[in-house]
Image: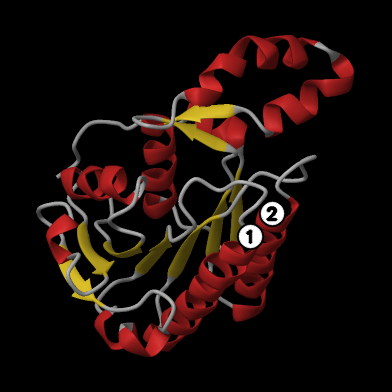
């Protein structure tokens, strides 16, 4: 397996703290973006890069020698009432990330998007779709990873809806929606992101909830 140099934004967040150790365990090198003062939160083994995720100029010269860019920045615990944060953090960060990745000539961009369409979270979905469109125009090879909700430590409350999902998946009119907006576990999400890093597409690849739910990490390839 090809070993990759991976640059990760959102490295100290919920998904970043799970992804980075998984990448390192498989022999990949990781450079992780952190705000000044937050470098200590970067998982051990990664190289900390200090910068502002909303300002490409603050870190774009530190991306090399990474060949893969993984963008995980987002508003914590998104709700329908956080439209302003989605525009000021999620949208601005993907704009900065694409600018920085193009500047650094990375070969592959992995973007944490969101499952859509959906009957809720319109502002959040609109921002993530804008990020996907921006990547599409950039000319970068890109993988869009589209979870709906990732179950894990501190994020288990939607598990109460699992029986409802089971019913909706069995009903023909709601089956597609239930599968598209299904719940996935943090280990599955981590495995899907690792798989995205290790299998760059020829142009653009979309990984939805059904694919995420099937993802599993293999053995250490180092």
Disc 2: which residue: 125
User: Which residue is more in the foreground, 102 or 128?
Assistant: 128
Q: Are marks 1 and 2 in contact (CB under 8 Å)?
A: yes
Q: Position of residue 168 (x, y in %)?
A: 76, 15
Looking at the rendered image, the quarter that the C terminus falls into is top left
Q: Is residue 16 left or right of residue 120?
A: left
Query: Which residue is under mark 1?
Result: 128
Asked whether residue 203 is in view, the answer is no
Indicate the position of residue 119 as horizontal and vertical percent values: 80, 40
**Neighbourhood count class around disc 1 (C-alpha, 10 Å): few under 14, some 14–19, many 20 upward:** many
The residue shown at (50%, 77%) is: 98
Residue displayed at 43% across by 31% down: 155
Q: Can residue 8 be seen at all in this image of the molecule?
A: yes
Decide which of 118, 188 is in the foreground and name it: 118
Local secondary structure at mark 2: helix
Residue 38 position in % (x across, y down): 20, 65
């Amino acid at each position: 397996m090809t070993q990759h140099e991976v640059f990760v934004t959102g490295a100290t967040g919920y998904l970043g703290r799970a992804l980075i150790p998984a990448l390192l365990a498989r022999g990949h090198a990781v450079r992780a973006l952190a705000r000044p003062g937050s470098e200590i939160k970067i998982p051990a083994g990664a190289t900390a890069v200090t910068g502002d995720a909303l300002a490409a100029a603050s870190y774009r010269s530190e991306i090399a020698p990474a060949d893969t860019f993984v963008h995980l920045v987002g508003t914590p615990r998104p709700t329908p009432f956080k439209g302003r944060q989605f525009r000021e953090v999620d949208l601005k960060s993907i704009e900065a990330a694409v600018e920085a990745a193009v500047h650094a000539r990375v070969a592959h961009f992995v973007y944490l998007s969101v499952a859509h369409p959906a009957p809720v979270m319109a502002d959040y979905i609109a921002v993530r779709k804008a990020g996907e469109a921006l990547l599409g125009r950039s000319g970068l090879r890109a993988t869009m990873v589209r979870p709906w909700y990732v179950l894990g430590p501190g994020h288990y409350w939607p598990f109460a809806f699992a029986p409802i999902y089971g019913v909706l998946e069995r009903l023909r009119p709601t089956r597609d929606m239930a599968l598209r907006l299904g719940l996935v576990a943090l280990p599955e999400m981590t495995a899907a992101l690792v798989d995205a890093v290790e299998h760059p597409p020829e142009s653009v690849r979309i990984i939805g909830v059904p694919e995420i739910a099937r993802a599993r990490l293999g053995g250490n390839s180092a």
